Amino acid sequence: MSSKWWLVLAASGVLALGVAACGDDDDGDGDGGTPSGLSGDIRVDGSSTVGPLTEAIAEEFNAENPDVKVTVGTSGTGGGFEKFCAGETDISDASRPIEEDETKICQQNGIAYEEIQVANDALTVVVNPNNPVECLTVDQLKQVWEPKSGVKNWSDIQGLQPSFDSELALYGPGTDSGTFDFFTEAINGEEGAQRTDYNDIGEDDNATVTGVAGAEGGMGYFGYSFFKENEDKVKALQVDNGSGCVAPSPETAQDGTYAPLSRPLFVYPSATALENETVDAFLQFYLDNINAVAELVGFIPMTDEQLQASQDKLESLTAGGGTTTSG
Amino acid sequence: MEARDATAATGGFGRRDPARPLAAVRPRYGEKVIQALLAGCAVISVVTTTAIVISLLSPTIDFFGEVSFSQFFSFDDWAPTQADPSFGAFRVVIGTLSTTLWALVFAVPIGLLSAVYLSEYANPRLRQVVKPVLEVLAGIPTVALGLFAVTFLSPEIQDVFPGFIKTPPFAAGVAGLAIGLLLVPIIASISDDAMKAVPGGLREGAYGLGATRLKVSTRVVFPAAISGIVASVVLATSRAVGETMIVLLAAGGTANATFDPGQSVLTMTAFIGKTSTGDIGTGTITYDTIFAVGALLFVMTLAMNSVAIRLVRRFREVYE
């Protein structure tokens, strides 16, 4: 994840230049529409996957509205909702929809919220480039990664095509990673449950790349953006969820055919925060710029329909709150 | 200066005014303050140790309220942060012992041979240059050594012995080698001091009987300095057990109960370092696990250090 932050810095640098140029235009157009008089704090926390996106947007927003301070924490999706439902944050970043027990805590504390999609991601399973295997079924992935798995060698995987004889070397993120939560839920069927004899690389996805590139029988997983950066070193496996092998790509993630490892990424604003003009302006700004930023940071942008849906949702929410911020 | 020198030269006799008492005329408050400061400094380390024990104690007790001794001290899976947690701490203990073993396998021979060379063979001028350089090696930040292990040692080993490292770039042997680099100066320097402290008469006696330099080194000086040498090895061992950054970077993150240098292992310190930098709630079982492992590590290093202190004391008594 750490190298993603560098991308964010680079991306926000590029965008800063763009916005600086746009800013001049806005001044010429007239200052009625721009939310320049905004001030206050916006507290965001949650998924470390979505964090870099929100951070990039926040920096842009801050350049236009210097009096608004946006703080973006990355406690993980679960940790973020914990704070969100305690009323400590305005917006929660999430790499999965809110869960039932989290909903209950929010209700108990009187926190109402809305879900807005901001991007897509495709968790990518990577192997060594010399590995002849191109595609694994979800069940085969489960054989490898499930708790107490006895698979030590690629040849132990049932129904493997073509046959491959090499000792498995597994690399995976730490247990407090949202990627770990999502992968274990999607593949092993239980969040947080995975075999224990894999190399826990913490949040350093680069170690997975080094490891898988160096070990013939290596296998690991991380976000699509990180795979794109290292396409020359590792190979992405196709995943068969019962209806044929599908490779991870922006298209297959957007239309959901790369299942079950493609996922939408969300932000959750609280109802109280939506009554705040500054938060509204921030969210509007978020959706206006998200697809450009997502591509720069290496995420999979939303389709036009997804973006429209998110924008409609935000508009209905802010209209209900009685504030109009769209310029 | 002159007056005091004169007094010293005459033994103070006849110069002192007999009417003036020996006790201080005025109370020396400044001295009292300095004394208190010095005592305070000495107390700090005692207080710190006590505080560490106290802070370890309560979460450790909480931990054993939920996890039985028999599960903790076992070879069960080590997966304290997973959905279905398991706490076989012997796996991380073995991980620690494995990196320590490989570090010592590398560092003890090289360290001791350097010490013999420096103490018995090197001419004094060379020794004056080599010894400080050797000691600088002990001052290299361990994070630099860890990166050196992952980015240089590991690929080199893979080139020379393909397939030796099972999950590149991580392996207990690679981490052990890097820790070994850190231990060589510790062992060499302390052992060299111990050998230098062997009275010259022993050497001269042996030379007088016609012994060669090699015989003097191995049959006379080495055995005479053995307790100092053992102390250096014990100190190096507890340094290796407590080493964190190198194993965090180079040993991997798999709790394999193995001494195979090609396998990745999770040491106790690496577990603590890895887990405590993540996002864990106070009072959760994961949080308590960190302290339980910390307490176990504390007991292990404490035992080893007391052995080292005892050996160093014995070594001193021999020559005074």
Image (spheres, rainbow, N blue to C red):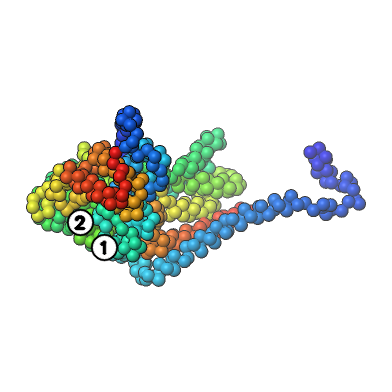
Which quadrant, please, contains the N terminus of chain A? top left
Query: Is residue A25 left or right of A150 when viewed as pictured?
Result: right
Query: Is residue B25 left or right of A179 when viewed as pictured?
Result: right
Mark 2: secondary structure: helix
Q: Which residue is mark 1?
A: A100
Marked residue chain, label 2: A
Q: Splitting the image into 4 quarters, where does residue B314 fall?
A: bottom right
Query: Is residue B131 left or right of A315 when viewed as pictured?
Result: right
The residue furthest left is: A243
Earlier sequence position, callout 2 versus callout 1: 1
Q: Residues within 10 Å of mark 2 (few under 14, many from 20)?
A: some
Determine which of the numbered discs, if any, sits on residue A5 in the image.
Answer: none
**Image location of residue B277, percent across then percent down:** 39, 52
- Between circles 2 and 1, the one closer to the viewer is 1
The answer to whether any part of residue B105 appears in the image is no
Marked residue chain, label 1: A
Mark 1: secondary structure: helix
Q: Residues within 10 Å of mark 1 (few under 14, many from 20)?
A: few
Which amino acid type is shown beneath numbered disc 1? Glu
**Image location of residue B238, percent across then percent down:** 46, 55
Which amino acid type is shown beneath numbered disc 2? Ala
**Image location of residue A182, percent across then percent down:** 24, 54
Give me the C-alpha separation between circle 2 and circle 1. Answer: 17 Å
Q: Which residue is mark 2?
A: A186
